[in-house]
Image: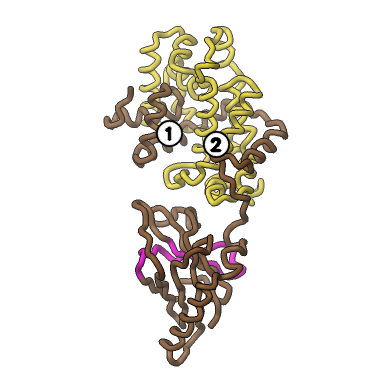
Chain colours: A brown, B yellow
Amino acid sequence: MIDLSRPDERDAAAGEYVLGTLDAQDHAAVERAMATDRALQAAVYAWQDRLLALSARADATVPRPQLWQRIDVALNAPAPAVRTEPPRPPWWQRLAPWQGLSAAAAALVLVLSVLLVQRAGVPEGARYLAVLQSPDRQSTGWVVEVQGERLRLTPVGGTAGVPAGKALQFWTKPQGADGPTSLGLVAAGRVSELPVSRLPGIGPQQLFEITLEPEGGSPIGRPTGPILYVGRSVAL
Amino acid sequence: MPTDATPFDYEAAVLACARGERYALRALYEREARWLLGVAMRIVRDRERAEDALHDAFLQIWQRASTYQPALGSARGWLYTIVRHRALKDVRDPGRLQSMDPQELATLSDARQALHDEAGGRGLDLDGLERCLQRLEAPRRACVVHAFVDGLTHEQIAQRLDTPLGTVKAWIRRSLASLKECMS
């Protein structure tokens, strides 16, 4: 039985886990520990990459054409172990999240636009508003206001906490852009402001979203985690 | 979508799977299935069972894509571990475990190996690992290769090399430690 509390044992266990020489009990123990032990997870990933080239010693075998069909059918099967969501295009190509704002959100847009106009007094520069809703449109989480050179992100409604080791990341994608641009991390329940010059552009129908990312933000410059709130700007 | 002209972005494909984008799983399959099936075949030594293993592995890739941590390592390493572990589960299943004929074991290690330039074309960095493997004594190197490529247990390797079980276990541990140091 391996002892994962010993440093020398941990790396050996990670290596043998990847290699496949642990017995069933130890294999399961490493898998369980990895769920919460990031250092062990990192050791396993390092071993995966160290030993990967050994896979070149196996000759290629072309699967029969039916194999993908079987996989495809199983993915669509309503078995509890398998995701049953239909295939989805990238979020910025999907219409659903902003096809129709809920009545509550539409009312909120109206109220906020009035407030914004009142607060602004004399309008200066372009003004836009976006209401960010959960993808199922059941709740509204944030409002984006753009006025002149400032963008203001205001939390509305409940402020759900962010899980440990995670962060909220704010993104935008102007119409026609290839993908979203990060506008940085935002604190739950707090107003954030940034200069519009940070944006790749600003206009109507521009997408804004907040995703759940690893602490420190997405390591690859694109959203990696689930979309928490998403919406599209309207010109005021 | 990546084309042959640009390196395939495994990380992006797995992250797209995590977002529920089915085309990304298909792209991974198109790109890598023949190599993954080859790896599974070496371990289970039966085409039907290898295809079953790859089938299950692709469902796992889809389901677990959100657990992949791009900051920790490559998506390809992650994929191969899922496929190899699924294939190993098959051969380690007590209902299917059979004692292997030493002659059969002997032929396994002599099986033709994929060409280096082929691996190079797939973007696999063989040189680092192979150079470090060559620094191990032949029987120790054989332990690691039999375990990874042929999916053999400690016991099967001991039988294959006609070496005491405890020695095989110690060799594997020390070989891994040497490889890690050599490749760092």
Amino acid type, residue under disc 1 in the picture: Trp
Q: In the visual, does A33 lie left or right of A148?
A: left
Three-letter code for the amino acid on which mark 2 is drawn: Leu
Give the residue at the far left of this rendering: A6
* Magenta span includes A171: yes
Q: Position of residue A125 (x, y in %)?
A: 49, 86
Q: Is residue A107 visible in the rendered structure shown here?
A: yes
Which chain does the residue under circle 2 lie in? B
Quadrant in which residue A82 is drawn: top right
User: What residue is shown at x 46% (from left), y 73% (from top)?
Assistant: A144
Mark carried by residue B124 = 2
Specify the label residue A132 is tagged with: none
Say if A19 sits above or below B109 in the image.
below
The segment highlighted magenta reads: A169-190
Category of crowding for the residue at label 1, using alpha-carbon neighbours closer than 10 angstroms: few (below 14), some (14–19), many (at least 20): many
Q: Look at mark 1 in the image and give the residue it sits on.
A: A47
